[in-house]
Amino acid sequence: MKNIELDSVSVGLLNKHRVLTSSSSSAAAAAGQSNGPVERLLASINDMMETRLRREDQLRDQRDKDQQMMSEWLIAATVIDRICFIVFGLCFLIGTAVLLFLATFLYH
C-alpha cells in the first residue's frame, strides 16, 4: 500500500465526498434503493481515510510530546554538564594551588 500524504485540499475533498455520499445514501434509502457496489466502495475508502487521518493525528501528537520531553531532558543535561564542569574546574585549580604551595613549602 502506498504512503499517501493528505493535504488540506484532500481533506476538503474528503469532507465534500462525505456530504455527497451521505445525501445520496439518504436519497437512495428514501427511494427504497440499496447502495450499489460503488457507494459501498466509496464508503469503505472514506472510512479508511478517516482512520488514517485519526492515526496521523495521534502520531503527530505523540511526536510533539516526545520532542517536548527530549528538549526538557536536553536542558537538564546542559545544567548537569555545567555543574560538573564547574566542580572539575574548581578541583583542578584548588589541587594545582595546593601542589604549588606544598612544593614551595617543602623546597625551602
Image: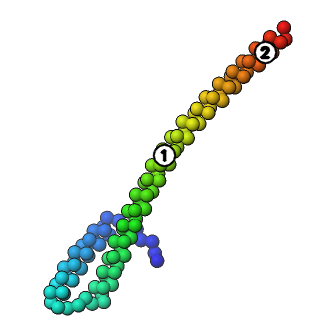
Q: Disc 2 designates what residue? A: 102
Residue 107, by quadrant, is top right
Give percent across and percent down for residue 9.
Answer: 30, 67
Q: Is residue 11 above or below residue 67?
A: below
Residue at left offset 51%, top offset 45%: 73
Q: Which badge, 1 or 2, comes first in the chain's sequence? A: 1
Is 106 on the left-hand or right-hand side of 38? right
Judged from the image, the secondary structure of the residue bearing numbered disc 2 is: helix
Numbered circle sitting on residue 71: 1
Q: Amino acid at mark 2?
A: Leu
Residue at left offset 18%, top offset 82%: 26
Would you say residue 48 is visible in this rendering? yes
Structural crowding at the residue carrying mark 2, measured as other residues with C-alpha within 10 Å and reported as few (<14), some (14–19) or many (≥20) = few
Q: Amino acid at mark 1?
A: Ser
What is the quadrant of the C terminus in the image?
top right
Q: Residues at badges 1 and 2 in contact (C-beta under 8 Å)?
A: no
Residue at left offset 47%, top offset 53%: 66
Would you say residue 6 is visible in this rendering? no
Is 83 on the left-hand or right-hand side of 102? left
Numbered circle sitting on residue 1: none
Give percent across and percent down for residue 52.
Answer: 38, 70
